[in-house]
Amino acid sequence: MKVKFPRWFYQLASPKWFYDISGKLLPWLIVVTVLLMIVGLTWGLVFAPEDYQQGNSFRIIYIHVPSAILAQSCYMLMAVAGAVGLIWKIKMAHIIAKCAAPIGASIAVMALATGAIWGKPTWGAWWVWDARLTSMLILFFLYVGVIALSSAFENKASADKASAVLALVGLVNIPIIKYSVEWWNTLHQPATFKVTEKPAMPSEMWIPLLIMVLGFYCFLAVILMARARTETLQREKRADWAKTVIENY
Amino acid sequence: MTPKRKQRLIIILALVFGSSLAIGLTLFALGENINLFYSASQIASGDAPKNTRMRFGGMVVKGSVERSTDSLEIAFKLSDGASQVKVVFTGILPDLFREEQGIMAEGRLDEQGVFQADEVLAKHDENYMPPEIAESMKKKAEAIQ
């Protein structure tokens, strides 16, 4: 069986091509991110109605839910990139995986912190050891583990391999986070966004939330590209194209 | 796909499936212990240990809240739909505490089957709505009744 992908798909693996195309895409993505964030934040924090039970403290959902979704998406991205790098020995995949780890870790911290800030006024506690919160904390530790492992090796190739393996082993945590609220009794409420159903809130509440989620995804793309560009230059510093880029900077 | 790549793909799939299986079996074995709290039925049927620290969760039964007039003591019943268990607590309740609201209490079950709580946390669900809509839904529900 031989599957043929379009040309640009194979070109993704070329560091030079990635550097060129991401340089062109980045300004547009930044504009889109800023627009989505401004619209989502003002709509969510100012114009969206308050909740009948929680009042205004519910508005932290517009930061908490996007960051929680993104922390998991970023992990999946990192693990898949790691697997692609391991199987096809593609340099770019390892660069993406390496750059995704610190971003994911910071977003996971944001999800945990906003969750704690939300938990205090509504539940009455900053932290509870329920299945959802604990599995989210484990996600953060996995990110930290991947970062530590990838910087523990002198040799870049071994570092990439080891951290990709750890990322793949940790992948099992993602469905646990997702279904923890259904499998066990937790203090945390069930998911806000479900694939199969309409969200259990009126549209003037969930549309800004959706905009924030999209804004966060674009934000991830921006930061990831920016980091990956630097990492690419660093790794390719002996290639002619990279030398020209650095000299002309 | 070259044989070498195919082999690496199989190894990686085996790695992911193997670790998922191991974690899955561990969680399955831990089972109930991962639950954050016991339900009212579990306490009523005697599954919950007495005189050990544990957590108990359920809905506050309508009309069961009794406040003391001269102290912060409060008594209420929690239910899971099937059974009801009385809870006694002294202290400040979270803002979201109200009748028919999900609550989690931490404390001990005494010999009389009363739950002596020293901490009460409020649970909320994912059904967010503006106050006006909540108000009109309440009115509709009353009209139907």
Image (cartoon, rainbow, N blue to C red):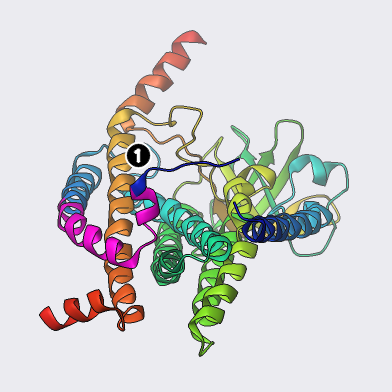
Going by the numbered disc 1, the residue's amino acid type is: Asp
Residue drawn at x 40%, y 63% as measured from the top left:
A107
Residue assigned mark 1: A51
**Quadrant where the C terminus of chain A is found in the figure:** bottom left
Is residue B90 visible in the rendered structure shown here?
no
- Compared with B41, B132 (above or below) is above
Is residue A138 covered in magenta?
no
Comparing A4 with A84, the one in front is A4
- Compared with B92, B123 (above or below) is above
Q: Quadrant of residue B131?
A: top left
Q: Position of residue A236 (x, y in %)?
A: 33, 78
Q: Which span is picked out in magenta? A: A8-31
Residue drawn at x 44%, y 10% as measured from the top left:
B143
Q: Position of residue A207 (x, y in %)?
A: 29, 35
- Compared with A175, A95 (above or below) is below
Subunit bearing disc 1: A
Residue drawn at x 28%, y 42% as measured from the top left:
A211
Comparing A22 with A1, the one in front is A1
Q: Quadrant of residue A48?
A: top left
Is residue B10 visible in the rendered structure shown here?
yes
Q: Position of B32 compared to B1: left or right? A: right
Q: Residues within 10 Å of mark 1 (few under 14, many from 20)?
A: many
